[in-house]
Image (spheres, rainbow, N blue to C red):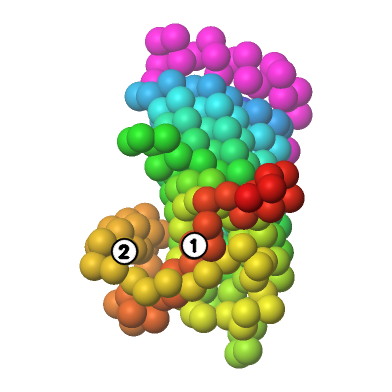
Amino acid sequence: MKTIDALNVYYRDLNSSIDNEIKTEKNITLKNVFGQRYIGRGLPKKVKIKIYGTPGNDMAAYMDGAELEIFGNAQDAIGNTMNYGRIIIHGNCGDTLGYAMRGGEIYVKGNVGYRVGIHMKEYKEMKPVIVAGGKAGEFLGEYMAGGAIILLGLNLEKNEDIIGRFCGTGIHGGVIYLNSAPDKYNFGKEVVKVDLTDQDCSFLKKHIDFYAKTFNKDLKHLKIESFSKYMAVNKNPYSNMYCAY
């Protein structure tokens, strides 16, 4: 395994070093990462990178199958237009996580910021998933067109909401699972609550089990039936704005 010290290294130089190393080495450790951008952008499968520190914006942008594990927090736009692969974050994550994400999985141990999952989409077998252990900020799943977002709502204060306002504004595909049933005022008008199916329960169990194993959490107290499922009212929520019928 190759180790790269990122202390005081300019982000372009750091990414260039990673590009050179993966030609022969598929397992890399980055230490002393402090805000460098674009780490892991476009990386193919079989590449695994462990990151110690706080990676900057657009980490894993257009990532194409690699696995990144971050031992710390992460900044904004992580997984931007990601195609395949997996991101594991042992901390919190900033805004626009999974922006236009097209495939792969992202697991965040703690909380996530605003506009998480904005413009997420899916195509055939490519169905992206975001799982966060805590809560999310406003506009969760904004303009979402596919994929799934799961919030576990762990360690919330009494009467603290799992989401901010305007959840699902403009949503026209995909699904949001929340370990609670927030008040209707938290949602955009395009969102409707629907019943869980057996398939939903299996899907939730699979990802909750992986979360628990990955972050060494005992989640036996979590009950699948306590989750609420939210989807789009219809697949073309703004049709009346542009069409006569």
Q: Is residue 139 left or right of residue 230?
A: right
The kind of residue tagged 1 is Met
Where residue 142 appears, as percent x and y from the top left, is 65, 54
- The answer to whether residue 148 is visible is yes
Where residue 118 appears, as percent x and y from the top left, is 63, 48
Residue at 63 percent of width and 20 percent of height: 15
Q: Is residue 44 left or right of residue 81?
A: left
Residue at 53 percent of width and 69 percent of height: 192
Above or below: residue 63 compared with residue 97: above
Residue 170 shows which numbered tag?
none
Viewer-nearest residue: 90 or 112:
112
Viewer-nearest residue: 199 or 192:
192
Q: Select label 2 or label 1 by which is in front.
A: 1
Where residue 96 appears, as percent x and y from the top left, is 67, 48
* Element under disc 2: helix
Q: Which residues are magenta?
A: 8-35
Q: Is residue 27 magenta?
A: yes
Residue 200 shows which numbered tag?
2
Residue at 70 percent of width and 17 percent of height: 13
Q: Is residue 120 left or right of residue 195?
A: right
* Element under disc 1: strand
Q: Earlier in the sequence, mark 2 or mark 1?
A: 2
- The answer to whether residue 144 is visible is no
Task: Identify the residue under disc 1.
Answer: 231
Where residue 152 appears, as percent x and y from the top left, is 47, 70
- CA distance separating discs 2 and 1: 12 Å
